Structures are given as C-alpha cells and as structure tokens.
Amino acid sequence: MHNFLPIAYFENQFVPFEQANISIATHALHYGTGAFGGLRGIPDPSNPQQILLFRLDRHCKRLSASARLLHFELPADKIESVIIDFVKKNQPDKSFYLRPFVYTSDLGISPRLHNLEKNFFVYGLELGDYLSPDGASCRISSWYRQEDRSLPLRGKISGAYITSSLAKTEAVESGFDEAILMNSQGKVSEATGMNVFVVRNGKLLAPGFEQDILEGITRDSILTMARDLGIPVVERPIDKSELFIADEIFLSGTAAKITPVKRIENFELKRDRPITMKLKDKLAAITENRDPDYKHWVTAIPLA
C-alpha cells in the first residue's frame, strides 16, 4: 500500500493526486514513449521546517536530456522550479520519493515521436528502504541488458524497463531479492534499477558507460566520494566470475541508496564490508546535509 503525497503536478497545474489521470488511449501507455526521473527527499534532521533534496540540479538536467531523446524540449530549470513548488505545496513530513515523468500525451496509435503532444507530470510517495539495508541476495538474470544501438540508454526511457521488470520478477520468483543483468558481451551491466559496484583487493570496480549502463547520479556521487576518501577506483568491464570471488558487492540508486549484496547465486559474500559501509555512512551524512564539503549537492527547500 503506497502513501502518495496529496498534490500532483499535472498538465501544467497542481491538482489533487486523485485527479491526475490520463486517458487509456495515451500514446506513452501503448509504446513506452516516456522517460522518468527519481529523487529522494527527507525532512532536514536539524530543521524540520525544510526539506532536503539530493543533487536536484543533476536530476533535472538528466530528465531534460531524456526528454530531448523523445523530441521534447523541456528545460532543466523548468523541471527544477516545478519540483521546488511541488515540495512546498505537499509539505511532506516523512522520507519520500519524487517521480517526475515526461511522456507523449497524444491520443494515438502510430508509433512515432514527431507531431505528437508531449507533457510532464510530477507525483510523490512516502518511501523507506527499497531493499533491506542488511543486504540483498542476487541472481544472474537470464535476460540481457539492451544495447545503446537499439535503445537510447543514456536516458531513463520508460519502455526499456520491461527488461528490468522481467528480470526482477524472475529473481523474486526464484527466491532472490534482485537480479544482475549482463550485457550482450557477457559482462556485468547493472541491476534492475540500480548500478553495480564490486570491491576486490581494496579497489572499487565499476562497469563503465560502454557496458550499456545507466548514467546513475548516485553512481557518479559514489565514484566522487570514493576518490575523495582515497579509495582506488577503476571503471572497467567486469566478468561474471568476479562477482563470485568479490570481497564486497553493493548496488546503488536513488531508491536503493547503497545496498550491500550478501549472496550471488549460491555464493555467500563476506559480511565484513569496510568499503561499502564507509561509502554508505558518507552518503548518509551528505544527504542529511551533515558534510560541509558536499553542501553543494543538497538543495534545502523551506516549508514555512
């Protein structure tokens, strides 16, 4: 049961969430011609009269770029302005997830992007932990990550998430929490809605952009944090067998934050996770605006 925030932004105005409805003939519903973002917001632990959003500017720029892939010019500053107003109108008092979405809102049956009405909405819901903070069990999916030559993977295109949905259900129905997808070359790509990190011999390893991964904002944050903490970082292709002998593995994303992996297939991983926990603690401090070196990553929105 989801607890949705009471106000949504829909068709250029703020309306009660229950009134933000689309037609069953909406083009994006039929063809996956939408793109979305996702942000977490929390009440400021030191000042409950304001909300903290993590890397708002980067999220808005990425959604604007995703919209451009759909032939929709939606400036990042317009998205940012709507999101700030959205938070002020909803006055959330718990941790929440915010979902901005761009889509082809025309009512039509032709799969195309030209000569179609486009639109943009925002809604939110209360959200705690997406996966257990104690760790997730993962299987290698039988489904493969798409290739950028057939689908624009630099955007969060809604239609692409059929693969994630198939992989997630396959994992859960076979007794796991999450799935890890390989790319068409048989290298580690990402999880169903998260990037993957591997720790081996004191180094933080991450699949690079050429491995058909999403350009994750939390991923980018972790790489920056790791380098600042003096943790060696290597972006390179990762083989499946490396997952089974890794010292640590964790998943990252807006919803998942940093979630350790406790098991891959039938291989149990160590419960001692020094690098994962160091990064997890650092990210928590930053998002709660307790780290002065990263204050530029946090947008404080006053509610009063």
Image (spheres, rainbow, N blue to C red):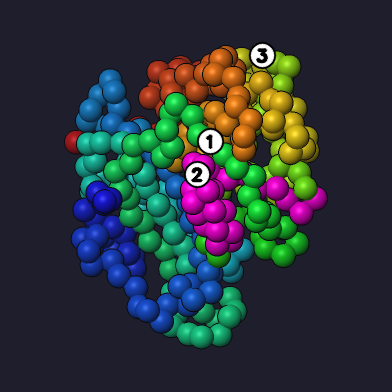
Q: Give percent across and percent down for residue 282.
A: 49, 19
Where residue 265 sits in the image (x, y, percent)? 62, 38
Q: Residue at x 57, y 45 (%)?
A: 179
Residue 57 location, x and y as percent? 49, 42
Q: CA distance from mark 3 to mark 2?
A: 37 Å
Instruction: Residue under label 2, please give it.
Output: 175
Q: Are marks 1 and 2 in contact (CB under 8 Å)?
A: yes
Give left or right: position of 110 versus 89.
Answer: right
Q: Nearer the viewer, residue 275 or 178?
A: 178
Report the disc number at residue 230: 3
Few, some or many residues within 10 Å of mark 2 (<14, 14–19, 20+): few
Q: Amino acid at mark 2?
A: Gly
Judge by depth and name the residue closer to the eye, 9 or 96: 96
Residue at image position (62%, 34%) is 266
Q: Is residue 92 above or below residue 228?
A: below
Earlier in the chain: of badge 3 and badge 2, it is 2
Q: Secondary structure at mark 3?
A: loop
- Residue at (51, 79) in percent of width and height: 116
Q: Amino acid at mark 3?
A: Gly
Pick out the residue farthest to the right: 185
The residue where tag 1 is placed is 137
Please state the total of marks drawn on the protein image: 3
